Amino acid sequence: MFRRFRRLIVALVLLIIVIAVAAVVLGNRSALDGARSRVDQRWAALRPPLQARYAKLAVVADALAKDVGPTERVPAQITKALKQWNALTAPGHQNPAAEVAIADDLEGLAAVAHTTAQSSDRIKADQAVQSAVADFDKTAAPVALVDAYNAAVRTYEHDRTSGLRRVTAAVFGYGSRRTFEPAPTS
């Protein structure tokens, strides 16, 4: 009789532990879903102004290509990255994590293009290049949207990497998200 009672107690304790673990994991999953959804919503708000910005960057790449040659490093890299951006942001093919990565690459390339446009007297004298760069500079990503997105990412990353949520994130595949770092404009 005592053995039966002890087995029942052990089974009951194990059941309580399993229920508690399941509640914690499922509760954390809901919180992580919410945090990741906020990141994606903030990115969706940034996507349209970035589309306009990168359309202007394509003009910069074309103007530079006409001046320095289409196979030169800067115009070729910008063109390649813009193709990736356009593929990622095509209707029905949105992947916010990959979009942010390529947007950060494009911002870095934009900074290089800006420097290239000021690198020699010949390029400085090319009105098409200078006009394209000036138009691009006018399309800066809205600071409020960038700040809101980056704040959502920081919150998600904190939630994803701390406490018991770290285990839930690993088990259910909550991958990391990166902040968006726009190129400084002159």
Image (cartoon, grey):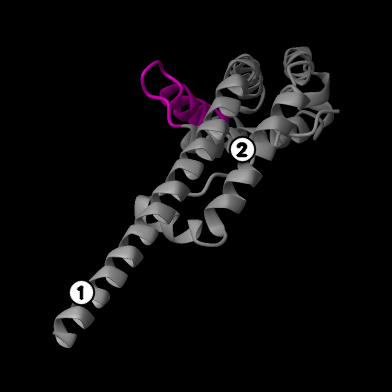
Instruction: Say which quadrant the C terminus sits in.
Output: top right
Closest to the observer, 21 or 52: 21
| Circle 1: element type | helix
How crowded pointer 1 is (Cα within 10 Å; few <14, some 14-19, many 20+) is rated as few
Would you say the magenta stretch is mainly helix, strand or loop? Answer: helix
- Cα separation, mark 1 vs mark 2, equals 58 Å
Q: Quadrant of the rendered structure where residue 103 is?
A: top right
Closest to the observer, 89 or 164: 164
Estimate the x, y position of residue 27 in percent, counting from the top left.
45, 47
Q: Is residue 33 left or right of residue 109?
A: left
Residue at left offset 47%, top offset 37%: 98
Q: Which residue is mark 1?
A: 8
- Label 1 amino acid? Leu
Residue at left offset 49%, top offset 61%: 164
Q: Which residue is mark 2?
A: 104
Q: Is residue 167 left or right of residue 69?
A: left
